[in-house]
Amino acid sequence: MLDVGRHPNIKLLAYSELEKLTGEAGNFTATVRKKARYVEEDKCTGCGACREVCPTPVIDLYNEGHAERRAIYSWFAQGIPSTHTIDPDHCRVLTGKKCGICQKKCQAGAINFEQKDTILELPVGAVILATGYDVFDPSRIPEYRYKEIDNVVTAMEFERFLSASGPTEGHVYRPSDRKVKAEIAELENKVRKSLKGLEKFEKDHGMTSAEFYAAHQNGSLNPTEALEKDRDKWLERYSAHLEHETPLLALKEKAKGFKSAKKLAFIQCVGSRDLRFYPFCSGYCCMHAIKESIIAHEHDNDTHSVIFGMDIRAVGKGFEEYKIRGGNNSNIVYKRSRVAEITKDADERPVVIYEDTKEQKVKKEPFDLVILATACGPVKGAGKIAETLDIQMDRFGFFKTDPANPLDTTRPGVFVCGCAHSPMDIPESVAQASSAAARAVQAVMKKTDQKAS
Amino acid sequence: MNKKNVSLYEEPRIGVFVCDCGSNIAGHLDCADVAEYAKTLPHVVYTKENLYTCSESGIGEIKKAIQEQNLNRVVVASCSPRTHQPLFSSSCAEAGLNPYLFEMVNIRDQCSWVHMGKRADATQKAKELIRMGVAKSAGLEPQEAIESSLIRRILVIGGGIAGLSAAQALSDMGLEVILVEKTPSLGGLLQQVNRLDTGKTARETLDEIIGDVRSRSNITCHTSATVQETGGYIGNFNVKIDTEKGMLEEMVGCMVVATGAVPLIPEGLFGYNGKTVISLMELEQKLAKNDLSAKRVVFIQCAGARMAGREYCSRICCLIGVKNAMLIKEKYPLTDVRILYRDMQMYGTYKEQMLWDARGKGVRFDVYSPENAPVVADGKVKFFQTITGKTLELDTDLVVLSTPLVPRKDSAALANMMRVPTDQNGFFLEAHAKLRPLDFAADGVFVCGSGRYPATSTEARTQGIGVASRVAAILFKEKLVKSAIVAEINPESCVGCKACLTMCPYEAITYDPGKRICQVNEILCKGCGNCAATCPSHSAQLRGFKPDQLLAQIGAA
């Protein structure tokens, strides 16, 4: 990424979209909308001071919704370019409220609330589509109860949990436990406030609120004139306080038993190899599951994983060896099965219901955390891209190519690589990217040759 | 560009630039104090604190100071050299100062980040780091970037689909290709294949590509030829090719290994006899000749693969098995076809679709486990059907063993000759499994196709085309320019002990038996410094990190 950002021959237009492509191979004009960042790229140094003072929290989709970012943000810490962006849907100024704190804080003077989208007309010889993929939304499979059961997450969410810079700093906490902890934090905040409101009474009357309340309850309260005056207010505030404190104490008691997730179930082919959704195979998820289980085990040696799959497709270089190593060294058990249903037990534990094909038995097994290998599907808006570029899509919704010319779309001079082509892993994507570059160079050179002759 | 050349005898005039990085650095240490301190250091004639040294105005300050203050060394105390050194040193060059006279000190990662909240300590450490950087910079010497010529001709070894595709793509880019094929005919393994998964025959596909390759004036094909010797380095490899017309000596700029792999002959596996128990490749031949009379066919996948001694999955045999099972069903719908498998490796879109279609055509699939592998005897295949828990005995006319692709026997010798590595299975080992799948670690040498790892014909073609852009990125440049930070060996003091020779991971050091000393090839050297650390007589030294420079830096600590 850094190399691309620094390369003298590469002009990086992040936060931009192609709107139109006219002309022909070797001589296209690409119309690109460069969206307003409300931050001037030539001034922003990426220092992040703005982010630290921004008062507006926004759900962080980079962390799959498990953390918060600010309305002025960079997608992730090492992103290229490091230029920050203001989210116009959430920024107070851009939604018509008063703020501008970031503008005051930015010493580079980079914040510009007046910035507008710009339209660029770029002369280019070839176009490479590397628009990637979108993962399948598992809530479309009702029997897996994603979103209904907190401790059923996607492989991408789990990836963020495992990341040292992610929302759980690499620890595998159960989302249901994190929810309780968030509730505790919220209640503690309220309790702190209500305690403040009781302070004056306690000081004035020389007793704790609990003593006061107990005396009031059993009629032993010795009312002075001052106490008589404060009594109702004190009572009211104390019962409001108890309303927060009682559940807080209960939750704290519950949280004492919280442990990180040790028993993991990985469910493969969620939305893929499934005629109801995507009939095809995503190619990379088996290895992704194995990698995640190995990392979880490296982080905590007590972790045990079961990977439920119809086939374990370890088809790349060194993959089968990696799979075997995971089984031998990282407590991974591979079970051939398509999971039928996921339910929940009393302790928020997801229960996996599946047929053990080796024993020909239907089994129920509880886990601490279930990780769904959600399918790799065509990117949202693939249809629009195809329309803009006037290219065809294949029957699966990816951009169509011919096996004899595996990088060429149906429009000469427009090439495709990576998961925009079809689901594939990193080495395949990188190799394809090099090939697409070769095809693009050829398209540009052909035109140059024609001009020269 | 007229770069300021500094004589070693010229008094150093050092400029120090301390970056606030907004509040990223200045928020956690006292940058003004640090800059003030830098003024007191030996040879420092100018210091400046910038809000952002990397901004246009910050760069402008450096350039202005080089000219106005006649600086001959520049030290920037800011962030990571990984991200910003190229910017600062090239800015120095723009102002006329040799870029190797620039030194960087990282007071962000090493001070403000790791000592956040300890302002005094962070400030103190920044001062000390700058003191060290300044001490080192005083001893820096100007260097000239190393340049070398490039020969715009490529040697492609192997005339299969990968090598042919690479040759085509390179030729399309106007580069000259020498294609060397060991056997008398081009086409590689695909010559033995009947139909491709695309529906076309392999022959049609090959003829199209071979015809095109043969017609190109900038591709020279040598069949029945082998590469005997390779030497030299990126841009200037010299190769000896044994052809039918005698030994040829050629110079090439890059080399591509596309030597493919061979299907395992399943001798001793599942009763293989070449008649009623045959390999996939033999089935391809049978189908090509329309010579199939069997009414009951059983495929056994992973025959000779995914086992002790050959752990890897050969990636393409499931596809080939399903493809042939479907061809049989299409042509002979009444034939009973079963595939016994461990995992069906039909990754991606259309392969999985083939699996659905094969089921639709009536091909039956059954899982077996390697602990309970099928037994072939007396026209029967006995196997444990996991899903029912029963052992079945299938009457069978033909058993087809899906065997893996294995590395060629001679690939180890080729690897040795070209000084490139192979992996534990004997396939060629690329520079980086994920990020550089087509490069060898050795500069200017590339790999594609099944020699790297089993690949479908489409994948091999993609990789062949991909190699072309890896090559073009080198050979489209006017000349090879690389960093001057390489090792040098003082011929006066070298005693020829060869300690450095064994330490060099890039084979950049050679021993000259005439002079009895070791010598560094600057183009091959990557500046790791192993030789300098090893040399007992301090004859091997790394430019920019010489003992007096480093000792000055350590001495100032």
Image (tube, coloured by chain):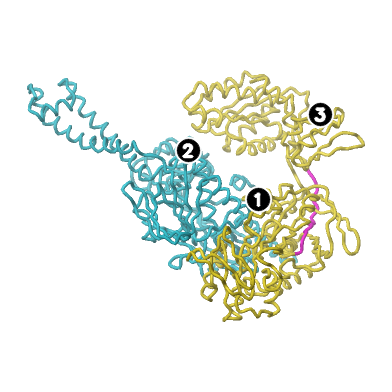
Q: Please give the chain letter of the residue carrying mark 2.
A: A
Compared with residue A50, is residue B350 higher up or lower down, i.e. above or below? below
Residue A396 x/y as whole percent: 51, 67
Q: Please give the chain letter of the residue carrying mark 3.
A: B
Disc 3 residue type (three-letter): Ser
Query: From mark 3 to mark 1, how far is it between C-alphas?
Result: 35 Å
Residue B232 x/y as whole percent: 82, 47
Residue B227 x/y as whole percent: 83, 57
Disc 2 residue type (three-letter): Gly
Give the residue pinned by disc 3: B539
Q: Are marks 3 and 1 in contact (CB under 8 Å)?
A: no
Q: Please give the chain letter of the residue carrying mark 1.
A: B
Task: Name the residue at 62% across, 35% down.
Answer: B81
Query: From mark 2 to mark 3, how far is it between C-alphas?
Result: 47 Å
Foreground tag (1 vs 2) = 1
| Residue A448 visible to the viewer | no
Give the residue pinned by disc 1: B436
Disc 1 residue type (three-letter): Arg
Q: Residue furthest right?
A: B514
Numbered mark located on residue A48 in the image: 2
Chain B appears in which tint? yellow
Compared with residue B171, is residue B114 higher up or lower down, i.e. above or below? above
Chain A appears in which tint? cyan
Dot placed on the residue nearer the N-terminal end, 3 or 1: 1
Q: Secondary structure at mark 2?
A: loop
In this rendering, would A228 be left or right of B425? left
